[in-house]
């Protein structure tokens, strides 16, 4: 089993139903979840040309989940099981 990082990008305030479904999804992956976290404000992008302020929200990374999976295909299947994937969040998955 390998660790896979799922980046949560974008944010729209979820409905209570979405929050409940999201909570159930987290319960369903509890045995393979390594870590998770959320960001609650913007950050900074640092590049060769300087620093740019990044606002929190639609176009920023807003959280992460690290899971255990056999391979990238299995990690993708797990991420697709999250109800918010299809309503408010874009995910990126990569081996950790």
Image (spheres, rainbow, N blue to C red):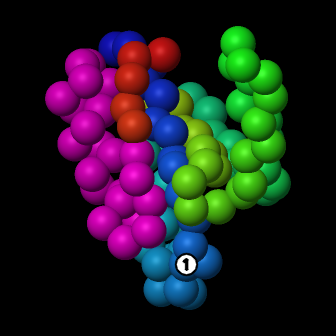
Q: Quadrant location of residue 49? A: top right
Q: Residue at x 18, y 29 (%)?
A: 73
Quarter of the image where the N terminus is located: top left
Q: Nearer the viewer, residue 31 or 50?
A: 50
Residue 72 appears at what percent x and percent y? 25, 24
Near-viewer residue (18 or 69): 18
Residue span colored magenta: 69-91
The verdict on residue 80 being magenta is yes
Is residue 22 located in the magenta-colored stretch of the structure? no
65 to the left or right of 79: right
Residue 84 in view of the camera:
yes
**For residue 45, side relative to residue 29 (left or right):** right
Q: Residue at x 33, y 46 (%)?
A: 79
Up-down: is 60 above or below 74?
Answer: below
User: Label 1 neighbourhood size at 10 Å, few (<14), some (14-19), many (20+)?
Assistant: few
Instruction: Identify the residue at the far bottom of this view.
Output: 16
Residue at the image position 61 percent from the left and 49 percent from the top: 60
Mark 1 element type: loop
Q: Residue furthest left?
A: 73
Residue visible at 56% across and 86% down in the picture: 16
> Is 60 placed above or below 89 here?
above
Q: Position of residue 77 (x, y in %)?
A: 22, 42
Measured from the top left, where is residue 3 in percent x and y? Answer: 44, 19
* Count of numbered tags: 1
State whether residue 28 appears in this view: no
**Position above or below: 69 against 40:** above
Side (left or right) of 58 relative to 29: right
Mark 1 — residue?
A: 14
Q: Quadrant of residue 78?
A: top left
Q: Give coordinates of residue 94: x percent, y percent.
A: 39, 23
């Amino acid at each position: 089993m390998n660790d896979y990082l799922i980046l949560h990008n974008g944010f729209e305030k979820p409905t209570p139903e979405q929050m409940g479904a999201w909570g159930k999804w987290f319960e369903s992956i509890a045995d393979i979840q390594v870590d998770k976290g959320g960001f609650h404000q913007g950050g900074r992008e640092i590049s060769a040309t300087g620093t740019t302020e990044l606002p929190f929200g639609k176009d920023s990374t807003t959280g992460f989940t690290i899971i255990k999976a056999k391979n990238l295909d299995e990690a993708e299947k797990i991420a697709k099981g999250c109800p918010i994937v299809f309503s408010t969040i874009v995910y990126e998955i990569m081996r950790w």
